[in-house]
Structures are given as C-alpha cells and as structure tokens.
Amino acid sequence: MENNRHAVLVTGASSGLGEATAIGLANAGYTVYTGVRSEENAERLAGTNPLIRPVILDVTDSGSIAAAGKLLREQTDGAGLHGLVNNAGVCVSAPLECLPVEDLRAELEVNLIGTVALTQELLPLLRMRTAVVPPAIPAGRIVNISSGIGRVAAPFLGAYAASQFAKEGVSDALRRELAPLAVSVSVIEPGAIMTPIWAKVATGARRVLNAAPDDVAESYRDRFEAFVAMNEDRARTSRTRPENVAAAVIHAMTARRPRTRYHVGPDAWAAAIASRLLPDRVLDAVVRRQFAAVAPAAGRAEQTP
C-alpha cells in the first residue's frame, strides 16, 4: 500500500525514452507500471527493477485501455495514482503529398487520441489522492511527452508535427481544466535523441516514398533523402540522452510546483525560442539554410560505394 501511494504509469516503455523514464522513476522509489505491447518486453522490464510492474497496453485499443484502468484500480487498492506519463508514440515521415491518409490516421491515433483516451480512463485515479496531499501540492500529475517539432514544424514531418502541435494544445486545455482539481499537467519537449525510433522512421519514410507515383516521388526524393540523413546524423551525434528526459519527468513528478513545459536539449530550446521570436518567413529561411548545408553532403554519401 505504501508503494502504491507513489504509483506511476508510463506508456511506450519497451524502449527509448519510455524505458529510461520507467527505470529512472523506479530508481527514485516509485512503483512504475510500464505500458508495453508484448509479453517479451514485459518479462524483460520486470527483471530490471522490483518496482517495475509491466502492463500489456495498446493505447489505440479501447478494450486494452479499459483493462489497464481496471488493473490499476485493483493494484493501487484505493490509494490512487500519483502520475501518468503519456510517452507512447510513433513518427511518420514523408512528404505530405505522398502520405497515405491511413498513415496519418495511425499517427494521430497513437500520439493524440491514445493520449486523450488513456488520460480520460485514469483521471479518477489521479484525482483520488486529493485527500492525502497538502492543498498546495498537486494530488495527481500528468506528463505528456511531445517534441521540439511540436513548436516548429519541419518539412517531411507534417503528420508528426500535426500530432505534437495537437498534443501541446490538448495539454494546455487539460492543464487549465484540471488546475482547480489539483492535477498538474506538464509537457516534455525533447530535441534530437538517439533511440530505436529513428530506424523505424527511416524505414517507414522510404516505404511511403517508394509507394508513391514516380513523378510525384521524384519531385521530393533528393530533398527527402537529405532530410532523412540529416535527422539520423543529428540523433546520432546529439549529446542529449534518454536519461535527460527521464530527469525532466522525475522533476515533474516530484516538484511542489511542476513546470508547464520542459525543453530537453539545445535544439528543443532553440525551437521554443524561434517559435516565439521569429516571423514565419524568417523561420522558413532558417530551415531552408539547414537543408542547403546538408543536401550536397547527403548526395555525395549516396554515391560512395
């Protein structure tokens, strides 16, 4: 029961940011329920820390969400839930002209609809701790993992940007709705970080482009390939690590007054500042210059045997 008073659910915990966050919270003494989609990942995570308790969870499946809510109500035994970390996400990369509408729907289902649906399911548990927490401290805490792309939309990431811009807006509305109910809402905006998602992004990106009509695909191919190479290089060389995101989540879970937004990494800070200060045309020019610098190098790399 004592551990359950500090129970947190982290979605998308099988790898990358979610796994690092779950381990960081468990090391900090929280009972961490980790949302994963396979028994294999559940067994692996269960062995990393005795405070980690895997939960099979698909945020696009209403039955799975309801089952997870039922399990948490039983496991927390009336103590409620200290926090929810909405980390589950996918990233679709493609020129919007080539993007299959079903891929856009899948992006929004995971990154946006799944976040809202799970939050709706667990809010009663997050409000439950009001009676045992001092009034000046949030009784429950929601942390939504977004991205620097939620501030500045990059070309060829239109679907992902749409989901993250929407998540930012939902988070703002939710924060204002829940403030009188003693539930805080924070957004984490990471920059480029090397995680397994990048291999999936590159594979999916090329699949979409190769499926497009040749005349359409060729209008974008060189710039798109340069973009994919640039993103992979940024993630590979970034000094920002998943543990930096985990540290931000832990602060949001422990601070008397959690921040509304956490920018993790210099590029995330740059995106936040640029979105506030630069006119659209100036920001467009900055993005174009980034591509002009990387496109020739990417082209040469493709010709290397």
Image (cartoon, helix red, strand yellow):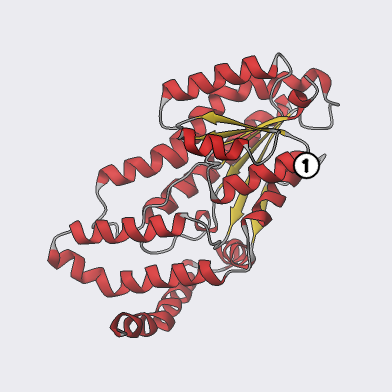
Q: Is residue 82 above or below residue 128?
A: below
Q: Amino acid at mark 1?
A: Ala
Is residue 277 visible to the viewer in this orientation of the structure?
Answer: yes
Q: Residue at x 28, y 61 (%)?
A: 206
Q: Identify the secondary structure beneath mark 1.
A: loop
Residue 117: x and y in percent read 49, 28
Residue closest to the eye, 128 or 3 = 3
Residue closest to the eye, 211 or 137 = 211
Q: Residue at x 75, y 46 (%)?
A: 251
Residue 272: x and y in percent read 60, 61
Q: Quadrant of residue 216?
A: bottom left
Residue carrying label 1: 28
Residue 139: x and y in percent read 76, 27
Q: Quadrant of the N terminus?
A: top right
Residue closest to the eye, 211 or 215 = 211
Q: Is residue 87 above or below residue 215?
A: above
Taking the image as shown, residue 194 lies to the left or right of residue 214, namely right
Q: Residue at x 55, y 42 (%)?
A: 87
